[in-house]
Amino acid sequence: MKMRLLSFMVLMMVSVGLLGCSQRTFEGNNIKERDVLYASMIIFNNDTYYLSSELISKDNLGDQIGQVEKQVIPSPKNNGEANECPVGTKIFQIKGVDVRESVAVYFQNEYRKASTMVH
């Protein structure tokens, strides 16, 4: 009886462990849970910038100040790294905006604003 109870408990722990390590997909699409947990980020000048959907017009672009050097999944940690933007993605200054606050990123054929968490 003790052996049967012990076997059942081990089986339950293994089952829970395997379920906890699985990658869930959200209903109706192929997005995995691990993909949702990380925002689109770029590390530039030792600051983390979060890419937004806000568009920047060409008239508001300043000089190109950098580019993505390495794509790192799921989360970049070093200068020049990004998790969603591919290698070669260009980074621009936004006219009248401090670079430590926001930059423009040429991503998916549009200039998008990327901002730090500066308060």
Image (cartoon, rainbow, N blue to C red):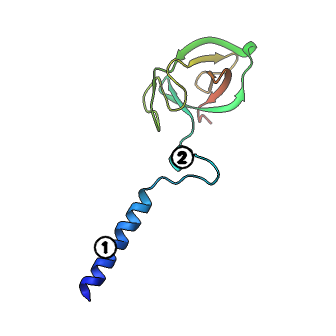
**What amino acid does circle 2 point to?**
Leu
**Outermost residue to the top:** 63
Q: Is residue 34 above or below residue 51?
A: below
Q: Is residue 12 above or below residue 91?
A: below
Q: Position of residue 76 (x, y in %)?
A: 46, 33
Left or right for 33, reference 13: right
Q: Position of residue 1 (x, y in %)?
A: 26, 89
Q: Which residue is mark 1?
A: 10
Q: Nearer the viewer, mark 1 or mark 2?
A: 1
Which of the 4 image quadrants contains residue 10? bottom left
**What amino acid does circle 1 point to?**
Val
Q: Position of residue 87 (x, y in %)?
A: 49, 21
Q: Position of residue 57 (x, y in %)?
A: 75, 18
Circle 2 packing at 10 Å, graded few (<14), some (14-19), many (20+), is few
Say which quadrant the C terminus sits in.
top right
**Outermost residue to the bottom:** 1
Which of the 4 image quadrants contains residue 16? bottom left
Q: What residue is rendered at 63% in x and 16% in y?
A: 93
Q: Which residue is mark 2?
A: 37
Q: Nearer the viewer, residue 43 or 31?
A: 31
Q: Secondary structure at mark 2?
A: loop
Residue 106 image label: none
Q: Is residue 46 above or below residue 15?
A: above
Whole-Å distance between the Cαs marked 1 and 2? 31 Å
The tag earlier along the polypeptide, 1 or 2, is: 1
Q: Secondary structure at mark 1?
A: helix
Circle 1 packing at 10 Å, graded few (<14), some (14-19), many (20+), is few
Q: What residue is rendered at 39% in x and 67% in y?
A: 15
Q: How many marks?
A: 2
